[in-house]
Amino acid sequence: MGTTRLTVGQALVRFLSAQYVERDGERHRFIAGVWGIFGHGNVGGFGQALEELGDSCALPYYKPQNEQAQVHASIAYAKHHNRLRTFACTTSIGPGATNMVTGAATASINRIPVLLLPSDYFAARTVDPVLQQVEHPVERDVSASDAFRPVSRFFDRISRPEQLLGSLPEAFRVLTDPADTGAVTISLPEDVQAEVYDWPEEFFAERTWKVRRPRPDADALAEVVDALVAAKRPLIVAGGGAIYSGAEAELAAFAEEFGVPVSESQAGKGVLPWNHPMMAGPVGANGGLAANRLARDADVVIALGTRLGDFVTSSRTVFQNPEATLVGVNIGSFDAHKLRALPVVADAWAALQDLAAALRERGWGGTSTEFRDEVGALQTEWQERVEFHRTTSQGNELAQPHLIGIVNDELGGHGSVVCAAGSLPGDLLKLWRPEDSKAYHVEYGNSCMGYEIAAGLGVAMAEPGRRVAVAVGDGSYLMMNSEIVTSVAEGVPFVVVVFDNHGFQCIKDLASACGVPPVGNELRAREEGTNRLTGDYLRVDFAAHAAAMGAHGVRAETEADVRAALRQAFAADRTTVIHVPVSATERAPSYEGWWAVPPAEVSTQGDVNAARARFEESSQKMRGDLQ
């Protein structure tokens, strides 16, 4: 074949537009478009290329208001598409690039693909130091983009055009691999972006990346069958991998046929409808009564597509049966081997099919009638408590759990709720009632404050006909809200409900549990007499703020007002922000969950010493054998 003379930026646009993915016979473009904020680092290189070739390559450009937000919008979009589609994100050098580092961490922790293209200083060093260049006195090749290395699943810095010939295919191998995926970063020096090269034509040919579905090893499968056949009280812990695999129907059929209850993590919530007869609800530190009691006594635990983070395992205290067998079913070997599990390195969809077939071949009829009745009784008791929290406020202001119930009622079980940080994820995990696997979108790997509104935009872009409600505290709203402007500019409406409880009440509770006085956790003015942030609450008009950005803004204080505002918002043609004051103290209680946050070992404060004693007592339940 011949060659085509293009700049690096132009070649990159051509290459991105030719990359496809295929799973189970369904094929489509992998890169849906490019987000970017331009500066001197990329405007003349990749920016010029997008302007010249973007339309002909069907690679649309989207302008965010913040570089971190563009990554979070891309993550949410990819998550909603089960990791089968994502965006590329471009920035200038320096602060534009480092603004994406937090987003890269969010993507890699959650195993979500996103392609990051930060700009870098002159590779030729003919201009040195360039504006916004970080200088190091003894390491001349260090730049701000090196900050991406620990939070990227793949990193490369391109110093010559021809290096892209090997780097880009490798980048897409990682992006499209369900075990390796996460943030992929290719740092592009600003002079290299504008350099020309004679590219081989085959570099721009359409390429289809087949998303693999590895099946379980026969020996590992046989061990799992042996464990289940002998089990009396098995439990499945379903994580995000079960959803990304598209294993919802297989999991429902498996649970029903064999009488194995299913619990859920934050990423796995919605894999079964909330009212499925074998859905035990959330497990772990923020878990519910039914799942945590089943986990406590389980003799076989199948961790299906979960990272087994500390919130899922209640800091390794939730599985208390010393004879329990933990089975790690995960497409990633790293995750499958956690906590000394019996590893089954396989796709969740394929693993459930093969495991069900093997159990039938062994003639296992599943769990006993008595155990299934116990699961049903626990479910009933748990749902009674959920209903109470969703419908009850004790004081004059709405309680956070009550407001969650109202929003869930009005959004419905097939709309998408989006959240990430604060006390809301814990209450949502307990109380939200999803009816499909895209109805619950909570980022709780990085639990990144500021993710919420950008992610709401990403979900709304991923499925335009779907209702989307962002549940966000006033603290996270203040941290990043600028993509409301982007939603107005793009004509992509969604609803934002601001749960205004005057600050970081989640951390105030955590400080109290550690015996620490609440300093800096609430949104208060500095008090002259104490020189501490103990003055009056600061009153922020979130509705007026949203209106100033072009959205609809409304304040609602009663249940009737909130319901009316939500109905109007879901019918509106632009984003609506509903500001709801909520109680600073009313949240859903813990249901036998625990989270290890160590108080100080030595203190002159009595409350701290008491908290340390409680911590050490609770720590005795930690499973030291699960390492």
Image: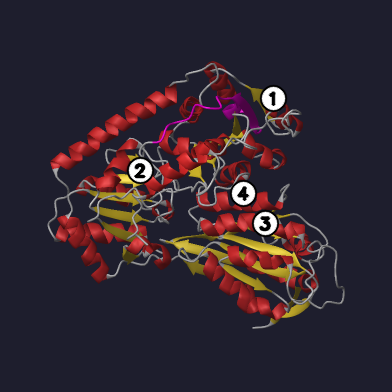
Q: Residues within 10 Å of mark 2 (few under 14, many from 20)?
A: many
What's the amino acid at mark 4? Ala
| Front position among marks 3 and 4 | 3
| Front position among marks 1 and 2 | 1
Q: Which mark is residue 73?
A: 4
In the displayed orientation, state which residue is furthest to the front: 604
Q: Earlier in the sequence, mark 3 or mark 1?
A: 3
Q: Are marks 3 and 1 in contact (CB under 8 Å)?
A: no
The residue that mark 2 highlights is 272
> Marks 1 and 4, Cα distance to the nearest angstrom?
35 Å
Q: Is residue 223 visible?
A: yes
What's the amino acid at mark 3? Met
Q: Which mark is residue 536?
A: 1
Side (left or right) of 69 relative to 604: right
Q: Residue at x 46, y 39 (%)?
A: 610
> Marks 4 and 2, Cα distance to the nearest angstrom?
25 Å
What's the amino acid at mark 1? Asp
Element under label 1? Answer: loop
Side (left or right) of 205 relative to 254: right
Residue 260 highlighted magenta (yes or no): no
Q: Which mark is residue 347?
A: none
Element under label 4? Answer: helix
> Marks 2 and 3, Cα distance to the nearest angstrom?
34 Å
Q: Residues within 10 Å of mark 3 (few under 14, many from 20)?
A: many
> Marks 3 and 1, Cα distance to the nearest angstrom?
35 Å
| Front position among marks 2 and 3 | 3
| Front position among marks 1 and 4 | 1
Q: Which mark is residue 100?
A: 3
Q: Is residue 466 visible?
A: no
Element under label 3? Answer: loop
Q: Residue at x 81, y 78 (%)?
A: 124
